[in-house]
Image: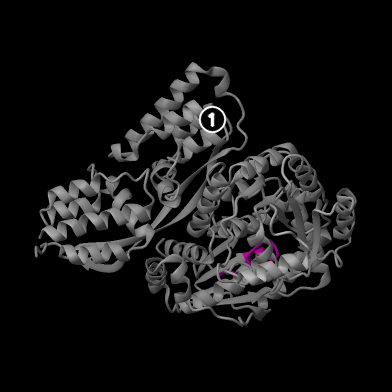
Amino acid sequence: MSEVAIASRIPLDDYAALLGQGEIDELRILAQPLRGRSIEMINSTAVGGGVAEILNRLLPLAEELELNMRWDVMTGGDDFYGVTKSFHNALHGAPYHAEPKDFEIFLACNDRNRSRLPLDAEFMVIHDPQPAALIEGRKEHANHWAWRCHIDLSHPNRQVWDFLNKFVARYDAAMFSSPEFSRSLDIPQYLFYPAIDPLSEKNRELESGFVSRTLAQYQIDPQRPILTQISRFDRLKDPVGVIRAYRIVKRYFDCQLVLAGGSASDDPEGAVVLKEVQSEANGEADIHIIELPAWAPLEVNALQRASTIVIQKSLREGFGLTVSEALWKKKPVVASAVGGIPVQIIHKHTGLLAHSVEGTAYQIRFLLSHPEIAAKLGENGHQHVKENFLITQKLKRYMTLFLAMARK
Amino acid sequence: MKTAETPFEFFTVSYLTRIGNQSAGTLSELLTGLNQCSDASIFHHTFQTLNSHHFLTEGFSNDFAQWAHADANREDLAEQLAALDVRDYLSIAALRSDLCRVVSEYCTANPTLAEQTALERFYFCEGLEVTLPFGLTARTLEEFRNGIAHLSHASFYFHFLSSRLRLQLQTNDFSHWLADGLGLGTLADSVNHIDIYTNTLDSARAKVLRLIDREGRKG
């Protein structure tokens, strides 16, 4: 078990230019009654994955507000992470039959971590299933415990959920990214959205020269419409479906398609999907399939900013924060109505939802034909993200939760 | 310059959305939910949604209307639900009664449509509210103006919109204090007539400030 040290800090006042001074003052007001009171976040990894990315941005902001927040990462062996990976997929609904040994490995690892941690912060926030059994170390009425679930529990494997539920039921509250992801529980369940940081490399303003150079690097024509989907090469992101939608659009508009995602070199399934995508593209010059390095925030930022329309045609999705990233950049988005996407895309207000290849193509054609509507959706989308999906809002939600739990 | 005996105290509010255990996949299920859900849920999907979606000034009124439009694909019902103006209600019970009446009449007139499955389910949620003093008070019109200019969106919403239920009057905190505290009844009325459905919180605030400035120039 180790405490994670945060390297970079962004002064809170830097956000005032984007959000307004009143919003920043409000964060300080909410923080005031929480100063000097301890908060501990626990998850299972310090690097990689959305949770670590969010905590890396959240903690410096909490520090700016003089909150006593620390972040600990649980440790476990390959056997533990093997089991929790299977649990993760099973909770998403994949077929799985757990053996008694799997549960023993899970419990033993949580037990070891429990003995290493004080678990005595006034507010404990446990992220995801891996450390969920740490609640066993709770001293009665000593502090407040909340479980933040980042995964979709709408159709979980019964055996794994029944096992996990015994621990979840002991928390004071649970938080989910969408009402659809929640379970029927006796403890209060709250809506907690994932968030983007508007000042991170992935989302901050870029010089136009950098955007131009990125397009030139990948031989993308800045003069013609650019349709973009940013996602890893995964069948659930339906990159082949995106190409098919693009081909329908291409009959009417001289446009280009960009499919950009993290490198598939360390992901055997990703490499297979990439081949399928290349085969479907069949060398067409206006389809740009870009394998980005695992961490390429500036390139992603530039490709999103250069896009005419951003697509997220997932078949299943967690929350799909790439949608918020595009909306923040005022881009019109056409996306599937799955997972957390409908929370971000309010149909016909902050973007357009689709349910098929043909539907996706139709919505793209509509937006290319009506740039003024596309611009309005992008503007509304930006405001929607500003109100709901920024890291500052996330911190506000946490502080509200702590204040609400403390007053009970 | 007039000075009020009782100062205006600015507050701010922060909401957590609590997910309920109730959802609807058809119009008839929506009606059941509307009848059974908590007052806090009705408040969340009508008043509070205007705060979180204030930037939508065209065709967005409340969550029930938006669901009828986007997920149940019933434009005619959506229009009727959207036409309910929260400013006309002094109690959640009265608002709930009208929501139920509109959906019930629609289901009775269209029994087949009432049972059709929507694209996405409607999840009944409710807001958990934490209010704190914003740290600003005003006794004069000038101090009041400066306070309003400095507020967060949530704080402006709290005083301008959600206050109607708190006051149980067809007015808002700002207008109430302008009339009672400073005796500026005409200004109070003008502020109360700003349309929150066709303004964002920012543009509504700008209008309040312009009205105050105009009043200030008179004095």
Residue drawn at x 85%, y 59% as measured from the top left: A270
Q: Which residue is mark 1?
A: B29
Which stretch is magenta?
A127-139
- Asked if residue A183 shows in the view, the reply is no
Residue drawn at x 45%, y 79% as measured from the top left: A66
Percent position of residue B91, x then y: 30, 39
Which amino acid is tagged 1? Glu
Percent position of residue A216, x then y: 75, 67
Q: Coloring scheme of the render?
A: one colour
Q: Nearer the viewer, residue A402 or B74?
A: B74
**Picture quadrant of residue A233:** bottom right
Which of the chains bears the disc numbered 1?
Answer: B
In the displayed structure, A16 sits above or below A278; it is below
Q: Quadrant of the N terminus of chain B?
A: bottom left
Q: Nearer the viewer, residue A407 or A378?
A: A378
The residue lying furthest to the front in this view is: A223
Residue drawn at x 52%, y 33% as measured from the top left: B68
Percent position of residue A33, x then y: 38, 72
Q: Nearer the viewer, residue B128 or B14?
A: B14
